[in-house]
Amino acid sequence: MGGNGSALRVCTDHRGGINWLSLSPDGRRLLTGSEDGTARLWSTDDSQCHGHFQGHESYITFCQLENEAAFTCSADHTIRKWDVVTGQCLAVYRGHTSIVNRILVAKDYLFSGSYDRTARCWSVDKERQIQEFRGHRNCVLTLAHYSSKDIPDASSEQGEKASGDFLVTGSTDGTAKVWWVSSGCCYQTLRGHTGAVLCLALDELNQELFTGSTDSTIRTWNLVTGEPLKVFKEHQGSVICLELVNRHLYSGSADRTVKCWLADTGESVRTFRAHKHSVSALKYHAGTLFTGSGDACARAFNTESGVLQRVFRGHTFIINCIQVHNEMLYTASHDGTLRIWDIHGVCKQNVRSRPKREGLAQSRSTPKRSLSQLFNNKVGCTVSPPQGGECEAIELL
């Protein structure tokens, strides 16, 4: 049963939809954040719940798990830090005046983005706000951090280069901004999108930023100069998620497809057509692209051939996040469950035949969806569970 990718375990402890799933850097634990206002800690060794973090006064929007601490943010306008061993709340970060929808832990910094139109930087250890980034005209949806030694120092008359940390923010105002962490000043405002910026992908080595938007395009930018480089235009719906692997950019869209682009040229080289609803999550692993969708299914594609290899069925609502570790696929859904699937061999599978009908092209005419539908976990459609309530994975050979 496990060898063909069937669900090994269904975790039903949450009493509300799961909005995010985070894997610790060492791979030992998973963290789920839920509409029920709690977060739960899971072991990847035994798939059991080993921690229940309670304290938020509203639903948890996002979470990030580090090896020694867990971080959650909430519609109660706060961020919390938790001890992964004792479950104790170690810190509460207060300052935002609306829903905190994204956090990012990098180095000794904790970054947050909110519907109050600001991003903020906090000291992880001292429970203190270090910086406020104000300038967006609408809510901040997504964050990225990078360090660079090649940014021109504005204070230098000789045009010398300065090293430093930078925060990148994407907003519903249609812009992305690059900020100096040290000063809170905006270094670049990246304009060009005609819709909200929903997702970011960074290539630090090549100093490039990729932004996906509700305007159905992806844009790429030079992080040093702010120069727009390319526009990827083939999607027919909002670009919801991005994954950059070896200069191949994968984009999941409300048009029910995933596209693979050559980052260097902007050429679309492959389209993965199988989903019956928006593509809400992407994860690349060992030559396989795993996707989560509003049709409540996860799928595995061979990235070289584009062939659909497996369909993982069992969820009854949108899959919000996926993780892969030790040949296990973890899917978290708005149906409130965390499901664990055995993917042993799927990444090494030699697909010799053409994909079946489910893998063929879907219609490009996808109804437009409002931003509230995209960001209140409403992009999924409720589906009936399989007869008997069992989960199944269909292998396509």
Image (tube, helix red, strand yellow):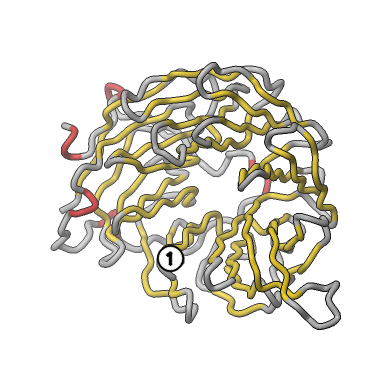
- Occupied quadrant, residue 6: top left
Residue for point 32% across, 37% down = 313
Residue for point 26% across, 28% down = 8
Residue that label 1 marks: 259
Quadrant including the N terminus: top left
Which secondary structure, mark 1? strand
In the depicted view, which residue is nearer to us: 242 or 204? 204
Q: Is residue 52 visible?
A: yes
- Occupied quadrant, residue 379: top right
Q: Is residue 373 visible?
A: no
- Occupied quadrant, residue 95: top right
In the depicted view, which residue is nearer to us: 198 or 71? 71
Instruction: Return the x and y of residue 279 as percentages of the image width and height.
Output: 47, 51
Q: Is residue 368 above or below residue 248?
A: above
Residue for point 68% across, 22% down = 56
Around disc 1, counting alpha carbons within 10 Å, would you say few (fewer than 14), some (14 to 19), or many (20 or more)?
many
User: Is residue 260 rendered to the left or right of residue 390?
Assistant: right
Instruction: Return the x and y of residue 213 as percentages of the image width and height.
Output: 62, 61
Give the residue type that dot 1 points to. Answer: Lys
User: Is residue 369 rendered to the left or right of residue 323?
Assistant: right
Residue for point 48% across, 29% down = 335
Q: Is residue 253 above or below residue 120?
A: below
Instruction: Return the x and y of residue 75 as percentages of the image width and height.
Output: 71, 31
